[in-house]
Structures are given as C-alpha cells and as structure tokens.
Image: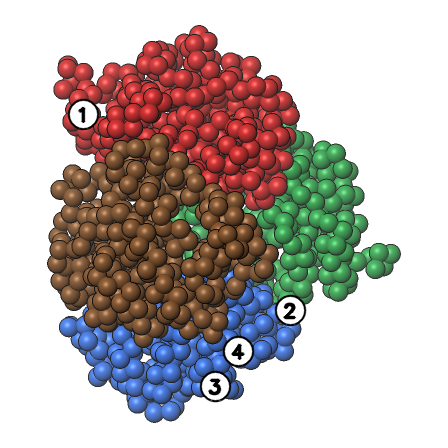
Chain colours: A blue, B brown, C green, D red
C-alpha cells in the first residue's frame, strides 16, 4: 500500500556503494559518504540505484548496504531505495526486506527480461504497491530497462495512488516536460525527479521537483547551490553553477573503450577517491577497473575545477 | 565448475509452466506435460526458460517447478534449467538451488539491467561456472537481454571449458551459421541448440546439434520426426514436417494487440488446453489473458492441422 | 566553400509546404505563410526541412518552393534550405540548384541508406562544403537518419570552417548541452539551433542561439515573445510563454493510429487551415490525411488556447 | 505498370561497381566483371544495389553504369536495377531513366528519411508501379532503411500485381520462412530472393527462388554449383559448397575498425582485385579504403580456399 510519500524535493543523490579491494562493501567509507552528503544539504538519499551498482549485489548485500546508509543518516533525510528485480513477485520479496531495513520509500522499474504491454506494466506496479508497506516510485530508465514508461501510464498510476513519484532517467526532455504539464493538470499526484544531471537548471526551469545526480557523490555542494538558486528564481546563478558542475562532470568522458557501467561509476569512484571521500575506487565484480591513465585524467579534470584537496593537487 | 555436460542432441523443449486459475503452479498438469514430452521422444528438457515464464516466479516457485519436472522425468532425459537473474552473484544463488533440485545443467544469459562490455560478460560467465556444480550453458536472446553474445566470446568460453553449449534465440541465422563453423574449427567445444522453431530443418542442415521449440509443448511428435529425418539425411521429409508444424505454429499469430509474452505463451497454453495436455491456460500474473475470440482462432488453427482430439473438434 | 554564414539567432521556423488537393504546391498559400512568419518577427526561414515535407518532392518541386519563399521574403530575413539526399554527390546537385534559387545557406544530414563511420561522415560534409557556394549547416535528426552526429565531429567541422552551424533535433538534451559547452570552449565556431520546440525556454537557458519550431507555422508570435523574454533574462515570462505554447502543441497528440509524418505535419496543417493561414490541409502524396475527428480535436485544442479566429470558434 | 516479370530464379549477383583511382566508374573492369558473371552461369544481374554502392552515385552515373552492364550482358540474362531514392516521385524519376537504359525490372525500398505507416508504404509501391514501364520488386533491407516490410504488405502488393518479387536482406530467417509459406498459400504471386549469402543452402531448402550474393562478385561458380545441387535435391553437396563459400566469405571479417560499407564492399573489391577480376579496389568517395594489412588478410583467406591465381599466390 502506498501511504503519503515523504517529500524528495531538492537534491537526492543516488548513493554510490564504496567497495573494498575484495569487492565486499566498505561500510566505513559508505558511512563517511552518507555523512558528507547529508552535511552538504541534500534533501534525501536514493539508495541502491544504478550509481549504487545495485544490480551486482545479492539481496543480503543490499540489506547490509541500506542498513549502513540508514544508520549513518539517522533519520535526518528520507531514504528511497531501489528494488531492482525481474518482476513483481521477486521485487516484492526484495522491497519488503529493504523497507524492514529502513527505506522510507521504494523505487522500481518496469519488468526486466519480459515482453509486456503498458497495461501489464500498470498491473505490475499495482501489484507491488499493494504488497509493500511504503510509498512506491517508478523509475524510468530505458537505457537499462529497454522500455519507456508512458505518460498516460504514469499519470494513471499517480491518480490511483499507486505511485508517489517518478525518477526520470529517460533522456527524453520533451517527454519529461509533457509529464510535468500532465501532472500539473491532474492536480500534482506525482513528485517528479530528473536524473539528467548536466541540465538540472533547465529541468528545474521546466518544473522538476528534484534531482538525482550521480555526480553529487563527487561534489554535492554545487548541486545544492544550484537548486537553491533555482528555487529563488535566480536562473543566471543556477546556470553558472550548472556550467561549473558540467566542467567537473567531464570526468565521465575520460575513460575510453570501457563499458557504460565501468565508465560512469568508474569515473565517479575514481574522483571520490581522489577527493578523499572513499578509500578505494573498486567497482562491483566483473566490471573492468579504470586504468592509471584514466584515473590521472579524472584527477586532472578535478584539479581544473579546483576540487582536489591541497595535498593531492 | 563445469564438468562434462550431458548431451542435449535432439529436441529439448522449453517446458511450459501450467498454472491454476489463482496463478499458482499446477503441478498435476506439469507432471502430465513432462510425461507427454518424454514419451514423445524428446532428448532433454529445458526447464524454467522464457516459455516457462520463469521471470515471473520467485526462486521458491522455481525450485518447486523444477522438482516436479525432475520427479516426473525420473532421470529418463537430462534436464537443463534456466537461472535467469540480473548478475553473477544473484544467478549463482538461484543456480545452486536449481542444481540441488535436480538440474543436470544450468543455462543463463548475459547480465540484465547493467551496461557491460564483452570482456565483462566473459567474466560474468567465468564467475558463475566456477561457483556452481553443473555444466553451464549460455543463452543468447537479445530480444529480452538487449545484448548479443559475440562469436569470439562464445568460442573463447567454450575453449576454456567455461560453457558447454549455447542456446541461440538471437534471430540471426547468419551469426548462428558462423558460430557453427567456428565451433567446428575449434574442435567442437560447444553443443549448439537453436530456438528458431520455424526453420529447424534449415538450422539442422546448417549444423545445429539440437532444437528448443516452444511449440513442442503443443505437439512434440512432429519435431521428433523432423529431427530424425534430418539425422538420416532425408531433407525432403524434414522440410515437409517443418511446413506442417509451421501451419500449426500459426497459433501464435492469432492473438492481436497483446504483449509479446501474452501472445506467444498465451497461444501455446490455449492450444495445450485445447488438446487436453493441461487443465488451464492461465498465464503468469500481470500477463493479459487471451480473449475468447483468440482462443477460438487458436483452436481453429489446430483443427486445420488435425491436432484436436475428436471430442473437441 | 563555406563563407561567413548569416546569423540565424532567434526563431527560424521550418516553413511548411501548403499543397493543393491534387498534391501540387499551393504557391499562393505558401506566399501568405511566408508573409505571416516574417511579419511575426522571425529571424530566418528554414525552407525544405522535415516539416516542409521536403523528402516527398522532386528537385524541380523543391526549387519552385524555394523560389516562392524567396520571392515572398524579399530579402528581409536569411533563408537556410534543406538539401536532403542520399550522399555527397547527390546532395551537391540539389544544393547548387537551391543556392541558385535563393538559399543563403544549405543544411543537410549525414548520408542516408549507407553505413558510414564518423570519419566518413566528416568527409561527406567536407566534400559538400567544398562544392557549394553557400555556408553549410549540419542537421542532426537521428529519428530520420538513424545516425547521431558526434560531438567531436561537429566541433572539428566547425573549427575547420566546414560547417557554420548545427540544427539539433536529436532529442538528446544532455548531448546538446555538451555541444554548447564544447562550442564555447572552441571559440564559438558554430551557431546552434534546437528543434526541441516544447523546451525552448530550457534550451535557451542552456545556451542555444536559436530555435526551429515546426509549431511556429501555426502561431509564430508566441515563440518570438518567448525568445525575446529569454534574451532579456526574464525566465519566468519565457517559461509561461512556453507552457502556453505547449498547450497549443497538444494538437500533435490528437491524431491516433497514423504514421509520424501524418501525425506531426498533419496536425500542423490542420491547425494552419483552421486558423486561416493556408487554404488546404493536404499532405504530400502517400501520407494518410487526418480524419474528421482528429481535425475537430485539433480545432478544439486551438480554441482552448484562444487561437481560432472569431468566425470559426 | 507491372507487366510479367522475367524470372530471377537462380543466382542473381548484385554487380559491384569497379572504380578508377579518381572514383569515376571503371567501365572496362565493369564490362569484364559482367562477362565473368554471365559466363559463370548466373540467372540474372542485380545492378545498382547496395553492393554496387549505388547510393554514392548521381543518376547520370547510375545510367552510365547500367548501360555498361546492359551492353556487356547483351540480353543473355535479365537485369534488375535498384532505384534507390527517398520517396515515390524521386524514385520514379530515377527508375524511368534506368528502364530506358536497359533495366528489365526495377527494385526499390520503402521510403527513406520519412516516417511512414505500412499503409503509406503500400501506396508508395503502388504509386511507383503505376508510373514505370517495368515490373517492380520490393527490397527489404532494414539495416539501411530502418523499416521492415511486413508480411501482409508484401502478399497484398503481390496479389494486386503491384510487385513481382521481393529481395529479402532483412536478416530475419523466420520472417522469410513465413513469407514463403504465405506466398505459396496465395498462389505464388511473388518471386522470393534471399540476400543471406552465408545460409543459401538453408534458404533454398526453405523455399527461396533465388539468391543475391555479394560474394558472387568474388567467385560466382560456387554459388551456381550450390544452387544446382539444391535444385536436384542434393543437400549434402549444397551444404558442402556453402561451407566452402563461407570460408571464402571470411574475407569480410578481416578489416577491423571500419564502417559497414568500407568493410563489406571493401573486402569484396580487394578480393576481386586480388583475383584479377577488376583493376582497382577503389571504393566510392568518402568511404575509407582498406589498409595494406587488411588487404593482405583478404588475400590470405582467398589463398586458403585456393581462389588466387597461381601468379599471385
């Protein structure tokens, strides 16, 4: 059942999962990371998302990760946790464990592996919402799920009270703008978060409620400043901050020849390590690590935007 | 570790999962179905594949399904079971339970949801093979996984002894032909099964070792005759049998406006029920059932190829 | 050769091509449309683009269309004309005729039908630029060309002086933002126009130089006001205007079950006819016309945003 | 209008277009190539297809190429010519010139660049067929056209007499098998040619009327032997011949890092030059040439299957 969802209005970083060199979870670094993010002024934490490499972990590991995040957060901001699994019965099993471990809300995608219609996807969300004791959010990420959640589907599920919000990583700015307008027309049943971290100023101008920027793991303060500027209507400051952030975001274009997962999360973790936020840049098992050259380039980008501590510069 | 794989040379049907009207497993019908398939002369059973709707079941349900199949089979033919999950650590958990429940081999796909390179996918299979006590097969089904398993990757994994075979549902006949030739050149480390059930004669001429035809759940004897004809070089008989089967296969083109999963498995189950092989045509939860008109059309196709029992015709 | 390009900073509508019921060009309506657009304050005219249905016309027809546009425009604003053809030698033939007929600049895409690398696409643009006597622009429209023009490719061609600008209809807001930043870093060799007509406020905030909105054929004044507000930094007004425009833009979501070309241009033409801007809503030959119900719904949307003349409301 | 089409039953090679180093057509080599193909026993010539690099030529060049082919052929086998252009009015212009230049039939695709429904594509073919004085064929090549010609569409157009046949390069063996069956059921209105040159034996077993193998430009005799064996029901010989051909076909997997067009046609032309069939391996302008290493590897493959003349081995 979907009860009133906590507000996720503002910066809601998808928390990365620091690992030890043997690929087990580095709970000490994770605790430090959560402290950093909450102190920086984020409005919530998005646990166990794609940036958190959640797909690579067993449910036992996921629970342990979430427990560490919840303990470090100590109730200061709401936590939404990804329950990423194939279909409703399997998602429900995972989601229930995450709710027990401290999630204030659950987010999931359309079914994976299966070939479903929008009507079947609607029933998928309805089935999950009815079986868990936390608000449910829909995660629209076609690059991973290979299906787009339709506008009508989302508004319908919002109006029914099945979902409390949408995390949009669809890469479709026009679709997101239409979703904002349709949500407005329907009385705002949905909270709308964007994952387009390089165009946050533009998406906030368009009407997004909040942002889920992976790069906030590297530097969260800038996104918080950007959001605050936008909220007070100071769009020139918002744009300037975005442009500064985007120069930092160049870190993800430094690795070459690697997979999508190795490149994006790899660059984030290399930068987080360079900034002293985590101990190791290790990625989940079977993801290829960045080579030394890419790591150097990442540090070079950080130095260029003055984000390296004196000692390492 | 991958020990010597049982031979899956011949017809290896992907066993459908009969369900009761409440969407729980109909073990009685499943037992009857396995009896039918083994009596018809199949060379093995492919449990918990896409036709078996495996993605829609929890691991507990999967284990129960496999136990019923194994019990009904009573060791007469080898069983290969799908361990369909997101990534290696999760697949290993599922696969171990399936091996304990009676699987003689495990088949799985590239990771789901993640964005990986071919090198990372290779390590994915290596990690799984090293952790399970049964031969591992690779399942190439881009329509669901959204990645193609490359020729070099498969031959490399075969040569290393990581995988014992490939189930090809890629829809790429040229790629499969190249795989057959490369496997031959490498000393045949792999058994090669095709899922292209409408061109089995052609794929056997090309050199496939066996076939995984969903439609064998509706009628298995025809595929067995086709395979036997091909093995003795009687290609005219093989083609005639294929053409007859394809007229029966028209059942899957009768439903309109439904999802891929509703259409394919839905038509199979409607036909199986019409032929008296299972009790109910119920599909996994959230999959839309066929309407009465589609069910009638399916029966009409079956009647047209004389596959309905006297009573129902 | 690419000489200094005229500025296309502002609203540059892709001029629709009014047709008579026999599918020949309605030059009288086209003249009237150009008058309307130029009087509304547009900064340029984009002739023979996708909205202009250019792919459906022979080169003789294209020349006649451009001549009418040029005559009606009478040099008031610069005209950029699409030379849409398969490959460089064929594009050059078309482009030369269009330059002779009055185009101030030429815009074209990557090759069609062929399978080319980014290096080959670069040579494609170089070959065309060297052979025509007008500035060349690159048109990035993957939904039609099925190739994305890469960031490095565009900046390289801009720096070489091969292309003067880019018309971006890629649907990739992040890619466009990165292009803006890279262009800035390179000394602004390129003018950057967006075709994302529902997020013009956001794209202008991000740094676009101008806009190519198909819906300006229906109402151009709103886009001009939006652009002016953005230029003076009044983002609240820009957003309000965009939101009003988007309610009007709902016309393109009224037709159902038709092709992309029938739906988009069909809705524009139905609305243009309803507003009295053109005589007939006829589309290019073999494109299915809107039915009466869709035409009514389009009028209803226009009435809802007070864009129908008193007589027709 | 579509009159009775000449039979294209057998091997119908897509004739490559030899070029001089300045990228103009090498008519002497083209004449020699046609002589070679016809002497080898082909059943027809497919001029100006993808292997013929037709997209890279102006209509004047296309006419000149076809004239040379027609002259060299001297009426010995029928010639079908590709009229590859954006839409019906433009295709008709090209097609009429090709019919005048000696084409016995015309083949074209669905519209390019546009976004059409199957109904609009049907009208596209009807419009062209009504306007030209030669039988029309449909060319299904989604990798270039990005649309699949539907089964119902093709049978409908065949039954109406709009198209005389289909050249299938769709990569969809199941779809082709269904097309064969539906054509049979409809009274065989269509001739069906496959472009899947690595599985010709299988496609002939399935019921294809003929084959359009690009590799026949390198060696045509093998395909003729394969076809003859299949026609007399000697499938073991057909398969052996196919397997030999496929070892030769490895030439197209030797170049690395190049575009699709550079790789495929580049390998064919390098092999044709190595075998002395043409003078230069030059490809159409802006296509990147093979480097010396790739050319050597192509020769190595040819030597391995004993297809190099004594002098060059």
Give the number of the mark in front: 2 or 4.
4
Is residue D255 positioned above or below C312 on the image? above
Disc 2 versus disc 3: distance between alpha carbons? 29 Å
Labels 1 and 2 positioned on one and the same chain: no
Labels 1 and 3 positioned on one and the same chain: no
Q: Is residue B238 visible?
A: yes
The image shows residue B202 at horizontal and vertical percentages of 34, 37
| SS at circle 2 | helix
Give the number of the mark in front: 1 or 2.
1
In the rendered structure, find residue C240 and report the number of the disc placed on it.
Answer: 2
The quarter of the image holding the C terminus of chain D is top left
- How many residues crowd around disc 4 within 10 Å: few (fewer than 14), some, or many (20 or more)? many
The image shows residue D124 at horizontal and vertical percentages of 60, 34
Which residue is more in the foreground, A197 or A155?
A: A155
Q: Chain of mark 1?
A: D
Q: Which residue is mark 1?
A: D305
Q: Is mark 2 in CB contact (under 8 Å) with mark 3?
A: no
Which residue is more in the foreground, A227 or A124?
A: A124
Disc 4 versus disc 1: distance between alpha carbons? 65 Å
Which residue is more in the foreground, C266 or B209?
A: B209
Q: Earlier in the sequence, mark 3 or mark 4?
A: 3
Q: Residue furthest right?
A: C311
Q: Chain of mark 2?
A: C
Q: Which residue is mark 3?
A: A6
At 23% across and 18% down in the image, what residue appears? D275
Q: Chain of mark 4?
A: A
| SS at circle 4 | loop
Residue D219 found in image quarter = top left
| SS at circle 3 | loop
Disc 2 versus disc 4: distance between alpha carbons? 30 Å
Give the number of the mark in front: 2 or 3.
3
The quarter of the image holding the N terminus of chain D is top right
């Amino acid at each position: 059942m979907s009860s009133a969802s906590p507000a996720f209005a503002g910066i809601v970083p998808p928390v990365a999962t620091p690992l030890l060199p043997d690929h087990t979870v580095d709970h000490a670094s994770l605790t430090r990371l959560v402290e950093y993010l909450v102190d920086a002024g984020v409005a919530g934490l998005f646990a166990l998302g794609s940036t958190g490499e959640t797909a690579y972990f067993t449910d036992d590991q996921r629970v342990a990760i979430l427990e560490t995040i919840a303990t470090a957060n100590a109730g200061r901001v709401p936590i939404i946790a990804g329950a990423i699994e194939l279909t409703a019965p399997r998602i429900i099993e995972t989601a229930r464990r995450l709710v027990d471990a401290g999630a204030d809300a659950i987010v999931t995608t359309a079914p994976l592996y299966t070939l479903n219609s929008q009507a079947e996807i609607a029933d998928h969300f309805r089935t999950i919402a009815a079986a868990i004791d936390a608000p449910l959010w829909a995660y629209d990420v076609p690059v991973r799920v290979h299906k787009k959640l339709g506008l009508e589907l989302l508004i319908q599920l919002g109006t029914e009270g099945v979902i409390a919000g949408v995390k949009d990583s669809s890469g479709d700015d026009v679709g997101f703008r239409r979703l904002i307008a349709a949500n407005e027309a329907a009385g705002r049943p949905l909270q709308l978060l964007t994952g387009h971290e390089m165009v946050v100023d533009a998406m906030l101008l368009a009407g997004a409620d909040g942002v889920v920027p992976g790069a906030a793991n590297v530097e969260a303060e800038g996104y918080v400043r950007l959001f605050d500027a936008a909220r007070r209507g100071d769009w020139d400051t918002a744009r300037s901050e975005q442009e500064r952030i985007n120069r930092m975001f160049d870190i993800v274009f430094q690795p070459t020849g690697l997979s999508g997962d190795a490149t994006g999360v790899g660059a984030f973790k290399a930068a987080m390590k360079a900034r002293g936020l985590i101990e190791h840049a290790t990625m989940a098992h079977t993801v290829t690590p960045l080579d030394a050259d890419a790591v150097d380039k990442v540090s070079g980008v950080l130095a260029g935007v003055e984000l390296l501590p004196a000692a390492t510069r």
